[in-house]
Image: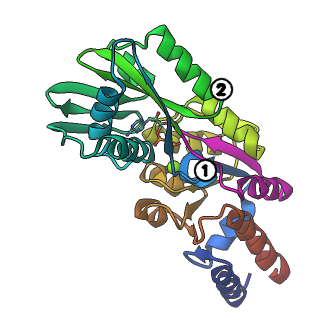
Amino acid sequence: ATPTALLVGTGRGAQLGILIRGPEILESTRRVDTVVLDKTGTVTTGRMTLTAVHPAEGVERAELLRLAGALEDASEHPIAQAVATAATRELGALPAPEDFTNIEGRGVQGVVDGHAVIVGRASLLADWSQHLPSALAEAKAEAERQGKTAIAVGWDGAARGVLVVADTVKATSAQAVAQLVGLGLTPVLLTGDNRAVAEQIAAEVGIDEVIAEVLPADKVAVVRRLQDEGRVVAMVGDGVNDAAALAQADLGLAMGTGTDAAIEASDITLVRGDLRSAADAIRLSRRTLGTIK
Ligand code: ADP
Ligand code: MG
């Protein structure tokens, strides 16, 4: 392709809300056969709301919300914001944690009002021998069957509640996936979230291949493994936790609505945060390179 034609292509992209880092990127765009899609914030809106509170027997709802909300208020994770917002709305101002640690892709832990509190995946609590009582395990399973995310809350050595948060699939995601498939690409859903939730969301948008329960640091290894299988991989993501995978992919596409870290690690920014732009980008590069060879 001539440099001029490539420049015309990138210019056309900008008009479509597709910012391409350099004209040479169009070349890698054309060869892609697999599109790895991050779930939260990419396929879904990432705006979570708290939909249910399940205290363990003998635990008060307000206590559960207060301790979990106070800790989550210190985290920027979408789940954390949903919990903190709901807790503040119901209880007013929350205490400031005396200690706080973020455990990437798993949850948070810290000290609130003198209690050692953990909020996150049930497996994180299980690492501290805090196992969900059967009623809570059942509430968690039921929420996950509905495609919702259930997180566990424990303090002072025991699991004491389950909080359910729900995210919504973007209105355009199913159409975007259909367009990607129409271009001959295989979509793969990649998430740190639970397998049951991931499969529910994948089914909603028409994705067959699901890679779930992947820690943020391991997303890059998943991309590398697909590449080792001989696939040419585009990755679409929005989060800090997607940055390394976006850089590793043959083509990294960041949601313009996402974090700076994701945008900086990418070759292409989808300004509108609309997944359909990913299909537009592939179509554009094929057209640009196809017509001028
Ligand atoms: P994704 O890959 O879908 O963007 P993450 O890797 O950010 O998701 O998180 C994976 C899982 O870890 C979440 O679904 C949740 O169960 C748990 N988790 C991570 N951070 C938090 C937090 N601050 N509070 C509660 N749970 C969390
Ligand atoms: Mg994300």
Looking at the rendered structure, the kind of residue marked 2 is: Arg
Work out which residue is located at the far bottom of the displayed protein and give it: 4
Query: Is residue 154 part of the magenta span, yes or no?
Result: no
Where is 106 relative to 86, above or below? above
What's the CA distance linking mark 2 and mark 1? 17 Å
| Residue placed under numbered mark 2 in the picture | 145
| Residue placed under numbered mark 1 in the picture | 44
Q: Which is more N-terminal, label 1 or label 2?
A: 1
**Circle 1 — which element?**
loop
Looking at the rendered structure, the kind of residue marked 1 is: Thr
Residue numbers of the magenta segment: 166-191
Crowdedness of circle 1 by 10 Å Cα count: few (<14), some, many (20+)? some
The N terminus sits in image quarter: bottom right
Crowdedness of circle 2 by 10 Å Cα count: few (<14), some, many (20+)? some
Picture mark count:
2
Question: Residue visible at 83% across and 59% down?
Answer: 183
**Circle 2 — which element?**
helix
Please state if 285 lies on the left or on the right of 141 as rendered: right
Please state if 140 lies on the left or on the right of 280 as rendered: left
Please state if 208 lies on the left or on the right of 222 as rendered: right
| Residue 222 drawn at (x, y percent) | 57, 39
Question: Residue visible at 60% across and 28% down?
Answer: 144
Question: Residue visible at 19% across and 40% down?
Answer: 95
Circles 2, 1 touching at the beta carbon (< 8 Å): no
